[in-house]
Image (spheres, rainbow, N blue to C red):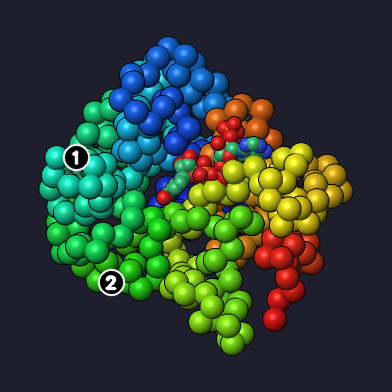
């Protein structure tokens, strides 16, 4: 079945409906250097992602403390044609603790530029196709961010900009200062994290006071749809909570069983059901696959074969939320 186009395909036509998340590449999150085994592991994962048609590869400067980008850069050095076949995305704005302070967010002009240049060096490329601001920074000044974006774009270091983990109001606040539209918002959404959807469906159910924080999401999906901002879903596989053979938490069991029943009914993998649930949303959500196991990555490709009915979509939603809708 032909998939409807993604918002991101307006500016980057080669963008694929599924993205691959590189957080699992590069080994450990400490200062130990990466090894040839890590390069081989990354190579197998990237080949599996390419096999199922993935073109968008998602990085962040912090993943495995820069090693995910370095290992990916090594793959592109060994296979130079790879760079032109993919949409390369990275993020900046989170800093680990150092002599100047604890773990923190930094969306200052200087830090955005310096972190992006460091990502480019590790990746061994001259440009990122998309740069995301990883998280909102309470000390951010949108005009400074606009200056950083302008500088990076004029120097040809970044083509497009987006955000991550930001609400509709934060995107609006930031966009007022930018001279280029935001093209992506990447946040956690899926059967394992329903908040961005729940914020809309439970808006007037009389229990909002019991869910502090969740209403901040209200309108975020709609804002992205209205402004042509691509929603990217992290934790789209819910880290295996519903696709594996057992549920660690008994509360997940009904949804896990339903995911397996639907997979059997449609002849697809359980991963395919999880990702198809996101892709059925009218925001044309782009799931970011976080597995680094080739077999599991290939299983994710089944999402492209499945279009869930309205009834199936709601049955999964109800099973994952654990109670009927109001
Ligand atoms: N913007 C942000 O703030 C943010 C935050 C987190 C992640 N991300 C991005 O989103 C991507 C995906 O996120 P994610 O890795 O957190 O979520 P995910 O895709 O839901 O989970 C991937 C993890 O779950 C494991 N897993 C999946 N299915 C499993 C199963 N059936 N049994 C056992 N383990 C299973 C995978 O292990 P295997 O590798 O062994 O398959 C992997 O460790 C990341 O790579 C990154 O690019 C962005």
Q: Position of residue 259 (x, y in %)?
A: 76, 51
Closer to the chain start, of discs 2 and 1, is 1
User: Spatial distance from mark 2 to mark 1, Cα to Cα?
Assistant: 30 Å
Q: Position of residue 230 (x, y in %)?
A: 46, 57
Q: Give the farthest residue toward the top.
A: 36
Residue situated in front as seen by the camera: 55 or 114:
114
Q: Could you say whether the residue bearing mark 1 is in a helix, strand or loop?
A: loop
The image quadrant that residue 91 belongs to is top left
Q: Quadrant of the C terminus?
A: bottom right
Q: Is mark 1 within 8 Å of ligand 1?
A: no
Name which quarter of the figure residue 27 lies in.
top left
Residue drawn at x 78%, y 56% as measured from the top left: 254
Residue 158 seen in the figure: no
Sort mark 2 into few (<14), some (14-19) or many (20+) by Cα contacts within 10 Å: few
Indicate left or right for 44 with 64 as reference: right
Q: Determine the residue positioned at 26% across, 47% down.
A: 103
The number of discs equals: 2
Q: Quadrant of ligand 1?
A: top right
Write the residue at 51% across / 49% down. Answer: 234
Above or below, comparing residue 64 to residue 255 in the picture: above
Q: Is residue 299 depicted above or below 109 in this figure?
A: above
Q: Which residue is mark 2?
A: 173
Image height of 293 relative to 204, above or below: above
Left or right of 69 on screen, residue 49 = right
Q: Position of residue 16 (x, y in %)?
A: 53, 44
* Residue 323 visible in the snapshot: yes
For the residue with label 2, is its CB less than 8 Å from the closest atom of ligand 1?
no
Front position among marks 2 and 1: 1
Residue beneath disc 1: 98
């Amino acid at each position: 079945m032909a998939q409807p186009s993604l918002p991101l395909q307006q500016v980057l036509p080669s963008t694929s409906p599924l993205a691959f998340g590189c957080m699992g590449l590069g080994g450990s999150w400490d200062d130990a250097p990466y090894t040839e085994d890590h390069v081989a592991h990354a190579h197998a994962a990237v080949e599996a992602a390419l096999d199922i048609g993935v073109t968008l590869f998602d990085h962040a400067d912090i993943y495995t403390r820069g090693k995910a980008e370095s290992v990916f850069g090594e793959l592109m050095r060994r296979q130079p044609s790879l760079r032109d076949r993919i949409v390369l995305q990275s993020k900046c704005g989170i800093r680990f603790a150092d002599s100047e302070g604890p773990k923190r967010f930094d969306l200052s002009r200087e830090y955005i530029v310096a972190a992006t240049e460091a990502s480019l060096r590790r990746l061994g490329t001259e440009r990122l196709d998309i740069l995301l601001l990883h998280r909102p920074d309470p000390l951010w000044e949108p005009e400074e961010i606009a200056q950083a974006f302008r500088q990076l774009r004029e120097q040809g270091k970044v083509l497009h900009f987006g955000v991550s983990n930001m609400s509709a109001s934060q995107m609006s606040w930031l966009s007022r200062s930018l001279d280029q539209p935001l093209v992506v918002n990447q946040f956690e959404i899926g059967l394992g994290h329903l908040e961005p959807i729940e914020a809309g469906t439970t808006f007037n159910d009389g229990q909002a006071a019991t869910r502090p924080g969740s209403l901040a999401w209200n309108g975020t999906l709609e804002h992205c749809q209205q402004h042509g901002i691509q929603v990217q879903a992290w934790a789209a596989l819910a880290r295996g909570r519903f696709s594996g053979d057992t549920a660690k938490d008994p509360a997940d069991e009904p949804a896990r069983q339903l995911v397996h029943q639907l997979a059997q009914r449609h002849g697809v993998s359980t991963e395919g059901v999880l990702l198809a649930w996101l892709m059925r949303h009218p925001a044309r959500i782009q799931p970011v696959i976080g597995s680094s196991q080739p077999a599991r990555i290939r299983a994710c490709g089944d999402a492209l074969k499945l279009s869930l009915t309205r009834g199936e979509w709601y049955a999964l939603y109800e099973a994952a939320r654990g109670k009927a809708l109001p």
